[in-house]
Image (cartoon, rainbow, N blue to C red):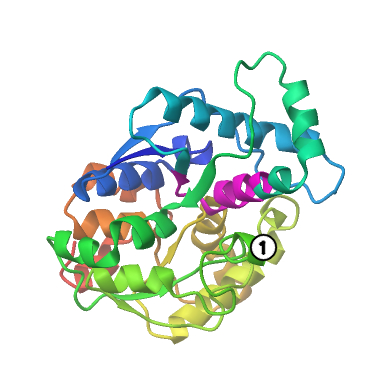
């Protein structure tokens, strides 16, 4: 299989571990990911103003690039995959919006008058978890596992952007289980915890880091109480807040217990034995290796 892949800005910078583990894991699953040519920033967040057209331009430009790439490659569908929850949410919502509002789409196409391709609402946006479930199949993932993550207890944290709003969700919005099903296929044990869809504090990390420290204390504390070895995420913003704010959470709450935070693709890369270059544990604040070594997985 061949699939167009949109990495997004952060996966080429602070979240390079997310990028390399995505590409390496998919190769082990016999899926060739082709990075989208000339991609640009997704816009980061979806503009909520109903009349806001300008903030749809960046997402639609990427959709045009996908359409062009698919047209040049025989047998390739006009769809693409992204791993980043924030990119997925922004691109998916913009796509839904312009499909529902042809006048708005016409305005955007007129603005992008230098583009040789016009967007007609004919591209599908997919998240990697969705693609793994619906196209690859978790049973196929399980067959490809070389190092089962036996004994590893994992808390799956979804945050906001994979389940809200309902129109972009590809699982139950109250109790999503898609990540848990993947973790099970990798041989690990998913452990439910009640705050898995709570907000991490997002961009309060910039102006009000104490809010994020409090959210980190509560979310990671809930996971710790469930007796997990680590927490997995699908959002670089969540990864930063829940990983790099743990020292701040410890200052707020002396009883706070540090836990490593990984991207779900890193556990895939570990189970599929993609190698250290696909893991990049050096980019973490809380080192995951002791927790993995305790389960004889490091």
Quadrant of the drawing holding the N terminus: top left
Residue behind mark 1: 201
- Left or right of 296? Residue 94 is right
Residue furthest to the left: 146
Q: Residues within 10 Å of mark 1 (few under 14, many from 20)?
A: many
Where residue 199 sits: x, y (%)? 64, 67
Tell me where the magenta segment starts and ends, as one range.
81-95
Kind of element beneath mark 1? loop
Q: Tell me if I can see residue 259 in this picture.
A: no
Q: Is residue 1 above or below residue 58?
A: below
Measured as percent of width and height from the top left, residue 20 is found at 33, 41
Looking at the image, residue 62 lies above or below residue 149 = above
List x then y, in percent, for residue 242.
53, 63
* Along the line of sight, the residue nearer the viewer: 204 or 198: 198
Indicate the quadrant containing the C terminus: top left, top right, bottom left or bottom right. Answer: bottom left
Taking depth in this image into account, of 274 and 102 the one nearest to the observer is 102
Q: Residue at x 66, y 57 (%)?
A: 202
Question: For residue 74: magenta?
Answer: no
Percent across and percent down for residue 275 are 18, 47
Residue depicted at 47% across the width and 57% down the height: 234
> Could you tell me which residue is drawn at 26 percent across and 44 percent down?
31
Q: Residue, x 40% and y 68% (percent of image)?
A: 179
Residue 23 visible, this angle: yes
> What secondary structure prevails in the magenta region?
helix
Q: Is residue 93 magenta?
A: yes
């Amino acid at each position: 299989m061949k699939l167009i892949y949109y990495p997004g800005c952060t996966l080429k910078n602070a979240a390079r571990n997310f990028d390399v583990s995505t590409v390496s894991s998919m190769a082990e699953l016999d899926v060739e990911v082709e990075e989208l040519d000339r991609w640009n920033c997704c816009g980061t967040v979806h503009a909520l103003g109903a009349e806001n057209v300008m903030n749809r331009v960046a997402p639609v430009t990427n959709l045009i690039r996908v359409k062009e790439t698919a047209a040049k490659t025989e047998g390739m569908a006009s769809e693409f995959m992204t791993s980043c929850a924030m990119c997925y949410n922004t691109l998916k919502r913009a796509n839904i919006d312009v499909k529902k509002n042809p006048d708005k789409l016409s305005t955007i196409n007129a603005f992008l008058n230098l583009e040789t391709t016009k967007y007609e609402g004919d591209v599908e946006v997919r998240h990697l978890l969705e693609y793994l479930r619906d196209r690859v199949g978790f049973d196929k993932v399980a067959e490809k596992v070389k190092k089962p993550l036996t004994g590893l207890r994992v808390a799956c944290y979804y945050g906001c952007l994979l389940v809200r709003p309902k129109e972009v969700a590809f699982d139950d919005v109250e109790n999503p289980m898609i990540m848990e099903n993947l973790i099970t296929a990798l041989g690990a044990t998913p452990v439910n915890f009640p705050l898995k869809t709570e907000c991490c504090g997002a961009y309060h990390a910039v102006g009000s880091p104490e809010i994020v420290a409090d959210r980190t204390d509560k979310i990671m504390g809930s996971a710790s109480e469930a007796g997990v070895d680590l927490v997995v995420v699908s959002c670089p913003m969540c990864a930063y807040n829940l990983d790099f704010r743990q020292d701040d959470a410890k200052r707020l709450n002396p009883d706070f217990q540090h836990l490593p935070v990984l991207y779900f693709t890193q556990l895939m890369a570990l189970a599929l034995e993609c190698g250290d270059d696909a893991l990049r544990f050096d980019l973490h604040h809380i080192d995951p290796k002791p927790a993995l070594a305790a389960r004889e997985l490091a």
